[in-house]
Amino acid sequence: MSFIADVWQWVLDNFWGNGGILDRSIEHLQISGASVVIALLIALPPAVLLGHLGRGGTLAINLVNIGRAMPSFAILVIALRVTGEIGVVPTVIALVALAIPPIFTNTYIGLRDVDPEIREAAVGMGMHGTQVLRRIELPMAMPLVMAGVRTSTVQVIATATLATLIGWGGLGYYIIVGLRLNNNVQAFGGALAVVVLALLADLALAGVQRLIAPRGLQLVEPPWAVETAAEAEEPETEVVPAA
Amino acid sequence: MRGLRERCKPRVLGALVLGLSLVAAACGDDGDDGGLTVAAANFPESNILAQIYGQALEAGGLDVSVEEDFGTRPALLDGLEDGDVDLTPEYVGALLNELEGPDTATGDLQESVSLLDDALADDGLVGFDASPAQDVDALAVTEATATELGLETYSDLAAVAGDLVFGAPAECAEFPACIPGLREVYGIEFQEHVPLEIGPPIFDALNNGDIDVARVFSTDAAIAENDWVILEDDQGLNPVQNIIPVGNEDADTQEIAEIVNDVSAALTTEALIELNAAVVSDLEDPEDVARQWLEDEGLI
């Protein structure tokens, strides 16, 4: 138990100030956020297009998966050598390569998985391609797309710890310094901070997902809403059965 | 120190059947087949050094086998005790700290060597003469920076450090012999510390001008390739890391000591830089590189 007490004391001692936990968490979020946004800009258009057309998906998914197969540290060092930069640029390149595959794959699959009968019905109602995409396919794919974004974000936040090796700060500092100088409290504290940051980001994105998902696709009512409805039993909210 | 007893204690029941045969094999072979085994730690410089000492002993008429990439320092120490290894190239400061705890080694060679000799004797091991060659944590600047600012020593850095960016691994910020030591001993306060790993990240950053001063190892091949200037640690902040061959009782003979000490005396930090460059950059075989150097020095 004293270890946990030590970690808590470490958090209290190092939270504020220049180079403190808060400071480094912000750095960490900045580089992670930028990487996920860039990955979205790169991955979404081709994934949406190919998913809509239903072509070339397998090839594309295998291509983007190279980013997943290559160790991030290898990409980091290659990016560093190729660009001749340290810090932000190689780090973002490595993290974008990591973030693209889940976003791309989930978006493509999300669009492909739209029930063909629904798509045909939409066409039958007179919708043209863009309308089908905007009003049917994208909304229906949204839960999977967001799942991809959330996966990418958590992975990116965890991996951004590597940035400390090539000239960017972030929370990786505590882990690397803690491990190298045999300070387990600091290493664990740093890892804990990364976990908390990843969970908070995931929670925030879950909120976004709830906000942007079409109501018809929200399968489960939030529990509190169900409860109030049952308790209230107000007649005007009762659905009148169709004759 | 971990010894024979611990290694031979079967730990996991499930692995007993398979394990016993391996354990029996490990315990049965005490390496005492009359020959001398020179083993290296698992990095290029250690392999080169093991080849150098091994080939010199072979030329002296001994029956020698050289084992490259034997393992880490603890594995080598176990090997010395078991007799699997008879001689291994070591570093004064690193070995002393391993045996006697961190921060035992100092910047004073004689003091550290005498502490090391005592520690080795306690384990039934022997240290030969320390070489002037040193693989120590060092600060490098580009030739242009050195000329422009007139930098030769750490002390020279103190006056100009406020305008210089320092590239070093993240832990340098808290490691006693790095940034805190530079501040206390020399009064060096860099403008900024950029966390960078020693290797391509730090080398590229120094050449590109992203950083002005880089933390490196004094025998790194990159120093020769890039004509960097290594600054002298004139107040002895970093613990000495001179090369020192270490052996067990099988290696503790007058004949071996003479050969090994001659080699150590001829070895220099500059020579090690060149040898490392040949192996790491030009991908030559440590065995050939070692033979060439011994011939050039007239040692074989």
Image (cartoon, rainbow, N blue to C red):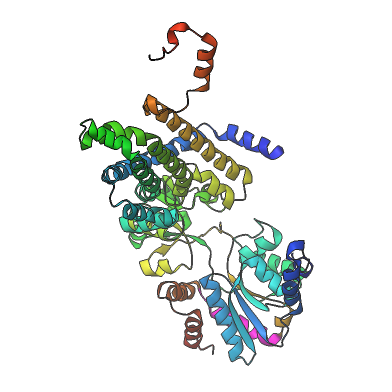
Nearer the observer, A159 or B52: A159
Give the overall secondary structure of the magenta segment. Answer: helix
Nearer the observer, B79 or B139: B79
Residue A18 visible to the viewer: no
Provide residue B72's location: percent of width, then percent of height: 61, 67
Q: Is residue A77 left or right of residue A183?
A: left
Q: Residue at x 45, y 75 (%)?
A: B279
Provide residue A202's location: percent of width, then percent of height: 47, 35
Q: Is residue B92 left or right of residue A165?
A: right
Nearer the observer, A138 or B104: A138
- The residue at the far front in this view is A243
* Quadrant where the image shows the C terminus of chain B: bottom right
Q: Is residue A148 left or right of residue A17?
A: left
In the picture shown, does residue B16 fall above or below A90?
below
Q: Residue at x 47, y 56 (%)?
A: B154
In which quadrant of the rendered view does residue B254 lie?
bottom right
In which quadrant of the rendered view does residue A146 lie?
top left
Residue interval drawn in magenta? B254-268
